[in-house]
Structure formats: structure tokens, C-alpha cells
Image: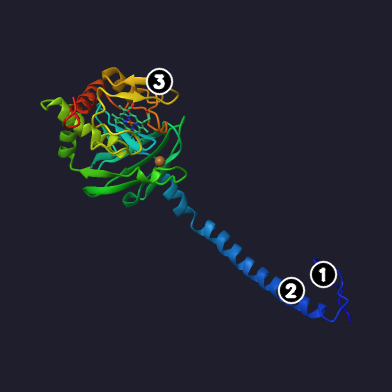
Amino acid sequence: MKDNGNLFLPPGHSTIAPGTDALFDFIYYTSIVFFAIVVFVIVYSVWRFRPWGFKGYLRLFIIPKDALEIKVTGQRWFWSFDYPDGATSVNDLVVPVGKPVKLLMSSKDVIHSFFVPSFRIKMDVLPNRYTMTWFEATDTGAYDLFCTEYCGAKHSSMIGKVRVVGEREYAQWLESSSKAGEGMPVEDYGAKLYAQKACITCHSVDGKASTGPTFLGLFGEQVKLEGGGTATVDENYLRESILSPQARIALGYQPVMPTFQGVLKDKQIDALIAYIKSLKESGSK
Ligand SMILES: [Cu+2]
């Protein structure tokens, strides 16, 4: 039986060998034919459509000079936005329609990923580095915003809306946002911030523990601390808990609260403290 073997096998010396080699050769040469077709189509497409891909890339990465710049910060587990004239918002990005908007993004902790499906933009948000993207919304409305980094417990809860509004409405929003809290009882402003600034995702106000302790009846309590000892919850303890959450950890909880240093203004911290103070358990002191 004449069988000289091939690149992959030594010469065959059994009755089974020729059949196996024939099947092998068939699969091998068929693969080569399809490989060649696929590579040809790839190389041809790269060459033939190069103006498109390149232009698309430039459109994504060259940000118009007159773009409105908004700072985006990702942190566990929410987004915050800083607008040019001092206004801020959490999880809701407000932008004017028909105007290019540049997002200058960074993270306070781990990698996040900023994704607005309706605008077809997605960009990683990294610690210690700025990344950028931009868009110009064509229609007013509210569009979903996601974090698409799923290597961590709660990126999937970093959801919000991009609210695209008219030019005038945007100016009004900016003004009311930087004046927020004026002419409103301070506890009410605190209650608003509790929802707006994402405290609500980890702290209840009805006595139920969630990721963090409930705010109900918190003020004036003696809280047990991780590592022993207790602390009396007064204004300073509350302030410290908001600005340096890792300084003293409440017993039985994970140290997962993000710092709100730089996110909340003094006025806002005062309002949150006033709100927490107002949450007394009925019947208690
Ligand atoms: Cu995230």
C-alpha cells in the first residue's frame, strides 16, 4: 500500500490509513479555500471602505470647538455631572438640544463605562485619566444612561437619564440648579438631595437596613463601630460620615460608601444633616 504520509503524519502502514488521510486532505484543502476567500474579503473591504471607517473615526474623536463642556465623574455606584457655571447633578445629565456637548470623564475608583444607547456613544471612564466623548442630541426627551462595566457588584444600578431640553429650558435649569435650596425649608431640600444624590440607593428612611444603615432615628443614637467602640451620632459625626465614610465604619456594614467630598457643597451637606435629624422614630425621644 503506497502512502507517503504528509506534513502532519508519518507514512501510513495500515488498511485504515488511506481512508483517514483522504478525509483529512478533504477537510484541509476545503479549509484553505474558505480561509482564502475570507481573507480576500477582509483585505478588500479594509481597502475599499477605508474612507468610511476613517471618517467615522474622525467624527467620533474630533470634538467641535464650540462644544459645551460637562465634567462626568463615575464612582461606586453613581454618576455625577458638573456644569460650566457651578451647577451639579447626579445620575441625570441635562443638556440643550441641537448643541454639541463634550463630556470630560474620569472615575474616582474603578473603571466605569458611560453608555447612552440612543446616542450610540459608549466610553470607558478611568481613574487617574481623562477620557472624552461628545454628542449633539437631535431631539428633546429623556434617554437612558447606563454603566456597562459589569465587573463589580452594582455597576448595573448606575442608571440615569440624559434629559435633552430646549435652549431656554436648559438655561432655566442651570439657574435653578445653582440656586437650588433657596426659598425652601432646609429639611425639604435635604430630602430632595437624599433622592437626587443617590443616598436613597443605600439608605432607607423607614427603619429597614439596606446596603447602609437606615436614617430613621439615626440622629442622637449611639452607633457601634467596626473594630470596637461607639460613637454618638451628632452633626459632626454625620458630616464626617458623608465626607470621609471610611474614617469610622458602622458595625456590621461593608466600607462601600463613596466619599461625597467635592460632590456636595457645604450648603447641601447642611441640608442633608437637617433632613436626617428630622427623621425621628415616632414615640422616641
Ligand atoms: Cu460603573
Q: CA distance from mark 3 to mark 1?
A: 78 Å
Residue at position x 49%, y 54% in the image: 50
Q: Amino acid at mark 2?
A: Phe
Question: From the viewer's perspective, is 256 left or right of 4?
Answer: left
Question: Considering depth in this image, is 40 or 103 the residue closer to the camera?
Answer: 103
Question: Considering depth in this image, is 152 or 227 the residue closer to the camera?
Answer: 227
Mark 3 vs mark 1: in front: 3
Helix, strand or loop under label 3:
loop
In this picture the colour scheme is rainbow
Q: Earlier in the sequence, mark 3 or mark 2?
A: 2
Q: Which residue is mark 3?
A: 229
Residue at position x 87%, y 72% in the image: 11
For the N terminus, the image quarter is: bottom right
Quadrant position of residue 91: top left
Q: Amino acid at mark 3?
A: Gly
Q: Earlier in the sequence, mark 1 or mark 2?
A: 1
Quadrant position of residue 284: top left
The answer to whether the residue labelled 3 contacts the one labelled 2, judged by CB atoms less than 8 Å apart, is no
Q: Amino acid at mark 1?
A: Asn
Q: Which residue is mark 2?
A: 24
| Picture quarter with ligand 1 | top left
Rendering coords of residue 46 (x, y %):
53, 57
Quadrant position of residue 42: bottom right
Q: Is residue 180 visible to the viewer in this orientation of the structure?
A: no
- Callout 3 crowding tier (Cα within 10 Å): few <14, some 14–19, many ≥20: few
The answer to whether the residue labelled 3 contacts the one labelled 1, judged by CB atoms less than 8 Å apart, is no
Q: CA distance from mark 3 to mark 2?
A: 74 Å
- Callout 2 crowding tier (Cα within 10 Å): few <14, some 14–19, many ≥20: few
Q: Which residue is mark 1?
A: 6
